[in-house]
Image: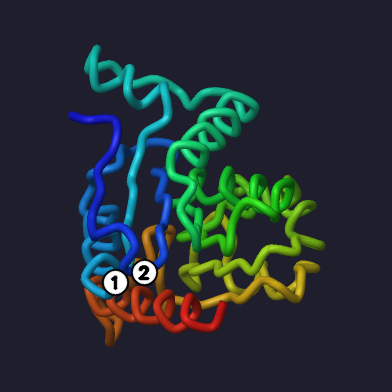
Amino acid sequence: MKNYIIDGVANKGPTFLFSHGAGAPMDTGFMNFFAQGLSNKGFRVVRFEFDYMLERRKTNKRRPPDRLPKLLEAYLSVIKKFPETPLIIGGKSMGGRVASLIASEYPQLIKGCICLGYPFHPPRKPEKLRTAHLEDISTKTLICQGERDRFGTKADVNTYILSKNIHLFWAPDGDHDLKPRKSFSLTEEENWTNTVQEIIIWAKNL
């Protein structure tokens, strides 16, 4: 496995740096769907893995994520390797959180930020919010969240103070992977397809 998976062509549209969540690599069904869906619409999507996930591939042993400073350093190093314009950064869950922290700290480096399933708080610990930097972030940010995400439901998030630069898109009945229950009227693929379309519309308005 290479350090990067690149879908799409440079200089045809925005470049999107797309990082994985805490427990799964860059080539899951979820990551593949969004990378391919966006690249089919003109994005150049660059996926990469943090050091702990690369080590997991080598040893086939699960490892916890690196500490936040190391994750931030790793993400910044990828930004330096892909200095394209316009550049959008983001990720799934933890990857999106890391990207949003960089977007808050270094708005001059990027055009926008996309978070798929943002971990607003750990499951069953709603008091431990990860929203301080989201209250005044100046970078245009899109957060695509499942309505019943255990890391931040729609009811939870609607009570938070968030920057006016954040746009929230809610996947109906979606969980942390934006997946609805089987009894719901929409399927997983429909929720994901609608989310891809929302990203495209949002990016055009940057």
Looking at marks 1 and 2 on the same chain, the residue that comes earlier in the sequence is marked by 2
CA gap between label 1 and label 2 equals 5 Å
The answer to whether the residue labelled 1 contacts the one labelled 2, judged by CB atoms less than 8 Å apart, is yes
Query: Viewer-proximal residue, 176 or 80?
Result: 80
Q: Looking at the picture, how far across and down is residue 7, in whole percent? A: 23, 55
Q: Mark 2 points at which residue?
A: 13
Residue depicted at 23% across the width and 47% down the height: 28
Q: Where is residue 79 in the image (x, y as percent from the top left)?
A: 51, 42
Which residue does the numbered mark 1 point to in the structure image? 42
Judged left or right of residue 110, residue 108 is right
Badge 2 amino acid: Gly
Query: What's under tag 1, amino acid-wise?
Result: Gly
Q: Residue at x 73, y 59 (%)?
A: 134
Mark 2: secondary structure: loop
Q: Is mark 1 on a helix, strand or loop?
A: loop
Q: Residues within 10 Å of mark 2 (few under 14, many from 20)?
A: some
Quarter of image, res 21: top left
